[in-house]
């Protein structure tokens, strides 16, 4: 069964750019590297040849992964979604009930996630347990580091900034 992969237009274009780079730049260069290494003769002890073949295999594998992602992708404009409950594209302000620490996350597609700047994948353990919840909800969330209790302070839509400035 295919799993639909929601993403913003930014994420879709990012994947398309990576595919283009792999097909038009990296793979042709690797093919050249293989041809040059073949000219060196004996393949048993030809480290350049083996490295280039490994690189080609990795590029082909990544291209397959990207093409699967693209074929299962659904471009979603978060500004058009309702954000009274946590959903794709929502920015959620949480308070850790134990420590009082406040954290803010925005839920994005897997290829767009960057936890360092507060962008978490909708497939992450935290996002999965927040989806559908509302402001004021208290929730115990099982994270890889253990159970945490949060209060949802705010759920809103704000324009998503995908890269640090």
Image (cartoon, rainbow, N blue to C red):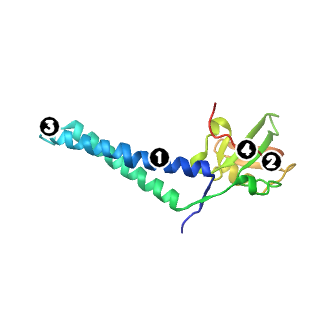
Quarter of the image that includes the C terminus: top right
* Residue displayed at 80% across by 47% down: 156
Mark 1 vs mark 4, CA separation in Å: 24 Å
Q: Position of residue 162 (x, y in %)?
A: 64, 40
Mark positioned earlier in the residue sequence (1 or 4): 1
**Secondary structure category for the residue under label 3:** loop
Which label lies toward us, 3 or 4? 4
Task: List the residue tagged with mark 3.
Answer: 40
Label 2 to label 1: alpha-carbon separation: 31 Å
Q: Is residue 14 left or right of residue 147?
A: left
Q: Nearer the viewer, residue 67 or 144?
A: 67
Whether residue 50 is visible to the viewer of this picture, yes or no, is: no
**Mark 1 burial class by Cα count in 10 Å: few <14, some 14-19, many 20+:** some
Distance of label 4 from label 2 (alpha carbons): 10 Å
Q: Closer to the N terminus: mark 3 or mark 1?
A: 1
Percent x, y of residue 60:
36, 52
Residue 156, numbered label: 2
CA–CA distance in space, label 3 to label 4 = 54 Å
Measure how far apart labels 3 and 1 are at the Cα level: 31 Å
The quarter of the rendered structure image containing the N terminus is: bottom right
Kindly state the secondary structure of the residue where label 1 is placed. helix
Foreground: disc 3 or disc 1: 1
């Amino acid at each position: 069964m295919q799993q639909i992969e929601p993403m913003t237009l930014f994420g879709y274009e990012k994947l398309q750019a990576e595919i283009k780079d792999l097909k038009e730049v990296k793979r042709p260069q690797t093919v050249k590297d293989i041809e040059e290494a073949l000219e060196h003769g004996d393949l048993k002890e030809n480290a350049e040849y083996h490295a280039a073949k490994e690189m080609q295999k990795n590029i082909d594998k990544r291209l397959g992964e990207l093409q699967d992602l693209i074929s299962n992708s659904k471009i979603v404009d978060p500004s058009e979604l309702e954000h009274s409950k946590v959903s794709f594209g929502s920015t959620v302000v949480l308070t850790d009930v134990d420590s009082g620490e406040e954290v803010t996350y925005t839920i994005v597609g897997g290829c767009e996630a960057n936890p360092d700047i507060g962008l978490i994948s909708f497939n992450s353990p935290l996002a999965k347990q927040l989806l559908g919840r509302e402001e004021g909800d208290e929730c115990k969330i099982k994270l890889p580091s253990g159970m945490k209790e949060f209060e949802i302070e705010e759920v809103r839509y704000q324009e998503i900034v995908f890269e640090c400035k």
